[in-house]
Each structure stands twice: as C-alpha cells, then as structure tokens.
C-alpha cells in the first residue's frame, strides 16, 4: 500500500519492443515508488532500459502491462488527452541535450510551457525570471540557447522543466554532456530546487559521484528496479 506522500508509483510495469523477428523485453515487472521531496538516482548500463523507464513513468509511453500511478491515481485508463494534461501539469523532463527552442531566448523558453498551460505572459515572465535567477542564469535570460554555455543551457532546461511546478522531475542523463565541474553545479542547482520546492526527482545518470549524493540509488537488473549496491 502506497503512503499518502507517494507521487510516483510503478507496479509490475512491463514494456517490450518488437524487433524484426523477435520481442525485446525491456521492463519485466518493474516496481518503484518515489515520494515527495525525494531524489533518486537510476544507475544502469546503457541499453538496460533507463530511458524506457523514464518515458513510461512520465506517461510518454504506455506500459504493456502493470500500472503507473501519479499522486496515487492510476494512469492506465486515461485517454491520450488526459495523459498529456497530467504530463503538462505534474511532470517535468530534463534530457541530456537541452532541447531548448533555438529561436527563443532563455526567458521565452521558460515562459512557453506556462503560456501553453494558460498563464498570461506577464505572470509567466515573472516566474521565469525568478527561476532563472534562482538557478543563477538570470543575467543570461535574454540570450538564445546557442549563446549560452552547456551548463547554462542545462540550467535553463531545468527551469523550463519546473516552470509549471510539477510534482515529479524526470531527468535522463542531465549532466551527461557536461564536464565534471559543470556537472557538479548543475546537479547542485537541481537538488537545491528539489529541496526548496518539495519536488520529487528520478535522475538517470552515469555519474556515480552525483548518484551517491542523492537520497537513494537504484538500478535496473533483468527488467526490474532494485537497490544499487555498487
Ligand atoms: P538506456 O536508456 O538504459 O540506455 P533504453 O531504454 O534507451 O536504455 O533502451 C533499452 C533497450 O530497448 C535498448 O536495447 C534499445 O535498443 C531498445 N529500444 C528502446 N527504444 C526502442 C524502440 N522504440 N524500438 C525498439 N527498441 C527500442
């Protein structure tokens, strides 16, 4: 039974892909729970299914079996439109490559998801400025992504991911493209934000030093999630 604080729960999640003549079973009954304010690292070799897990948890892909619960509510029977709404309101994504819109400024990139959700532009701009200041990229707010360093781009991507105050942040190798020092402060920014806002985060990473600084480290083994023991 999930506790009241559970923001994400996976129960027996299965996911397979059909390759030319056979089926690739990636998740084989994965169970997992993430609670408010918790930061969990997911460390597993390439190809183990980390992205598949994050996409399934984030309602971008439907599981073939099992169930995903967001804030205690089962998502299996939701329509595509309802899943999109849940994703927009409750889930933020950060990827290895920032995926910021190149023709818009940092500020506009953080405003856009809020405006899609219906916020007036003045309010969206105010929140975007606050977030960029908090992540110490405020002075770069008017610049386009190409004019920012890798670390700055990732901090803007984090600001965008949390712009709509999601319950859950799902990050897929968020520092995978950065040098160690930059990784360190991007991670600091991410964890400060999570602690300050009560956001729960599941972060796939190859960076063991960063993983150890999270509350818990899990891995994927034979399609299931188990504690990582090193
Ligand atoms: P990781 O993120 O741990 O590197 P992935 O979840 O990306 O792992 O991939 C797990 C396995 O599933 C890989 O073998 C990959 O090739 C395969 N896979 C992922 N997505 C698809 C897809 N859309 N179609 C077919 N195979 C896929």
Image (cartoon, grey):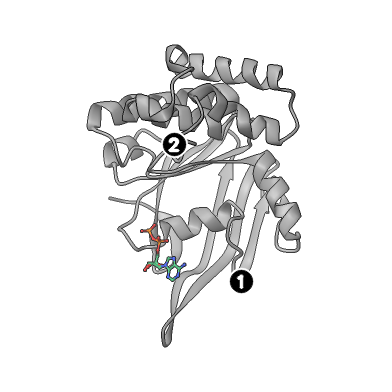
Q: Position of residue 221 (x, y in %)?
A: 38, 64
Q: Nearer the viewer, residue 164 or 11?
A: 164
Residue corresponding to mark 2: 215
Q: Nearer the viewer, residue 98 or 178?
A: 98
**Residue 75 sits in quarter:** bottom right
Where does the N terminus fall, quadrant-wise? bottom right
Q: Quadrant of ligand 1?
A: bottom left
Point out which mark residue 163 bears: none
Residue 46 in sight from this viewpoint: yes
Percent across and percent down for residue 115 are: 69, 30
Callout 1 environment at 10 Å: few (<14), some (14 to 19), or many (20+)? some
2 or 1: mark nearer the eye: 1
Would you say 186 lies left or right of 198 here? left
Q: Secondary structure at mark 2?
A: loop
Apparent side of residue 59 relative to residue 94 in the rendered image (left or right) = right
- Residue at point 62%, 31% (across, down): 112
Residue found at x 29% / y 41%? 207
Q: Given the current orientation, which residue lies at the most extreme top position?
A: 139
Classify residue 14 as left or right of residue 43.
right
Residue 5 is at least partly visible in this image: no
The residue wearing badge 1 is: 65
């Amino acid at each position: 039974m999930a506790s009241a604080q559970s923001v994400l729960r996976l129960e027996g999640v299965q996911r397979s892909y059909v390759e030319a003549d056979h089926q690739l079973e990636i998740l084989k009954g994965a169970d997992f729970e993430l609670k408010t304010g918790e930061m969990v690292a997911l460390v597993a070799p390439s190809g183990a299914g980390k992205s598949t897990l994050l996409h399934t948890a984030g309602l971008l892909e439907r599981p073939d079996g099992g169930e995903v619960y967001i804030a205690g509510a089962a998502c299996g029977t939701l329509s595509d439109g309802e899943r999109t709404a849940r994703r927009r309101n409750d889930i933020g994504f950060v990827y290895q490559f920032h995926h910021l819109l190149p023709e818009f400024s940092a500020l506009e990139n953080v405003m856009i998801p809020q405006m899609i959700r219906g916020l007036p532009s003045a309010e969206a701009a105010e929140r975007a400025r606050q977030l960029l200041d908090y992540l110490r990229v405020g002075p770069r707010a008017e610049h386009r992504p190409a004019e920012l360093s890798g670390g700055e781009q990732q901090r803007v991507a984090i600001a965008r991911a949390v712009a709509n105050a999601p319950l859950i942040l799902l990050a897929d190798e968020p520092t995978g493209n950065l040098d160690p020092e930059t990784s360190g402060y991007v991670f600091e920014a991410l964890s400060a934000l999570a602690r300050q806002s009560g956001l729960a985060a599941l972060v796939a990473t190859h960076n063991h030093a960063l993983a150890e600084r999270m509350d818990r480290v899990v891995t994927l083994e034979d399609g299931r999630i188990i504690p990582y023991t090193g």
